[in-house]
Amino acid sequence: MSELAARTKEELLALQKEVEAEYKGYQEMNLALDMSRGKPAPSQIDHANAMLKEMKDFHTKSGLDVRNYGLLDGIPELKELLGELLEISPDQLIIGGNASLNLMFDAMMRLYVFGTMGEKPWGQLEHVKFLCPSPGYDRHFTICETLGMEMIIVPMTENGPDMDIVEKLAAEDEAIKGMWCIPKYSNPEGVCYSDETVKRLANMKTAAPDFKIFWDNAYGVHPVFEDIKVLNILDECKKAGTDNRPYYFFSTSKITFPGAGVSLVAASPENIGEIKKIMGAQTIGYDKINQLRHVQFFKDAQGLREHMQVLAGCMRSKFEIVLDTLEKELAGTGLISWKSPKGGYFVSVDLLDGCAKETVRLAKEAGVILTGAGATYPYKNDPKDSNLRIAPTYPTEEELQQAMNLFCVCVKKAGIAKLLESK
Ligand SMILES: Cc1ncc(COP(=O)(O)O)c(C=O)c1O
């Protein structure tokens, strides 16, 4: 289809009628599909079911009984496995509970209540600001909002956050205490940070001495089409002499069971010492039975990588449905642009300004729930009302195709109405 903005008012009105009829057709189908969250499909999760079979051995190599208390920072076998997977020294990581988001929230709370390396606790400061590369992950923004931080939007580029802006803001304002990063197959755009971006993050000057990078590598081993190598922020910060700047997070939520996997936080030895001291007051230790189950299931890092290949095989066709349908129905219309991710969980699209909320509303009225418009921005407020996140993994291929067909009709309906406003 050709660029719709170039059409006359009459041509657009004629097209609007066609699209309206298509939309009505979908409304009559009584669809009930939920594409709002990035959840794996049950068929994908099934691949980890063998982990739930009866455990025969409850002991670590060193003879520790995982059914009993002990080991605040996790069993050595899992630390080794995940350390090898992520190229992090096992003594620089702590295995957490079922959710990395919990570790991120706790990290933020420690900074608020205790501060770090002798700096004033953030909770005692008049103003705390955080850089939020956007579009980004809504739950990161909810943590900031819950603690009353001021969130500052930083635009994303194809190489990661716009580093000219990050460097300028971080250097000039000591109230800016840190930033969120999703370095690989970012949520929602699938962006992988370039080597230059990672190096600049490690080397940049920050006005706040306790500036923290929350490095949420949630999709670190989640290729769908191509495995991309992203530099390790811990190594780059060590080289730059900013060892204490990053907290690195990871989990197996999208590897084994969402909400029932294992998570980790990794950091400099000094940071790990600080974290353990406070964490030791919070818990005697996380769920070591689940940790051992993960080790027994994967055996080693290579086993986990192979498992991810199986999952990529489950997801590839779904991503293709999304990308092919966008291409077939909307390429060249000028109503939408999108990025083709190499991995991760989402496809991010940008509509004409002012069309995202309307597109979500139209889809909902025809039975398809999308991630809310604005969810990818701080305060749920996308200043242009244009970005939407498509989460293709949960529905079956058939449902996804239906949902995508409807989605494209909604994009056309909202887009044509927007173009007609100025004709
Ligand atoms: C970027 C990002 N971080 C963290 C999470 C949640 O991870 P967890 O289940 O380990 O809390 C998600 C889930 O969608 C995510 O997209």
Image (cartoon, helix red, strand yellow):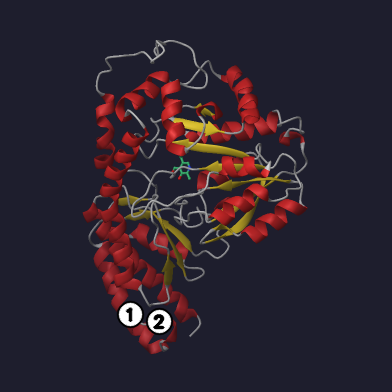
Residue 131 image point, x, y percent? 64, 50
Report whether residue 292 is seen: yes
Residue 11 pos. (x, y %): 36, 87
Q: Residue at x 32, y 28 (%)?
A: 299
Q: Residues within 10 Å of mark 1 (few under 14, many from 20)?
A: few
Quarter occupied by the N terminus: bottom left
Residue receiving disc 2: 4
- Asked if disc 2 and disc 1 are in contact, CB closer than 8 Å, the reply is yes
Some atom of ligand 1 lies within 8 Å of the CB belonging to the residue at label 2: no
Give whichever of 413, 4 is nearer the camera.
Answer: 4
Mark 2–mark 1 Cα distance, whole angstroms, equals: 8 Å
Which residue type does callout 1 highlight? Met
* Residue 41 visible within the image: no
Numbered disc 1: secondary structure: loop
User: Which quarter of the figure has residue 268?
Assistant: top right
Check disc 1 and report the residue beneath it: 1
Residue occupying the point 31% across, 34% down: 303
- Binning the other alpha carbons within 10 Å of mark 2 as few (below 14), some (14 to 19) or many (20 upward) gives some
Res 255 → quadrant = top left
Number of the label disc, if any, that sits on residue 121: none
Q: Nearer the viewer, mark 2 or mark 1?
A: 1
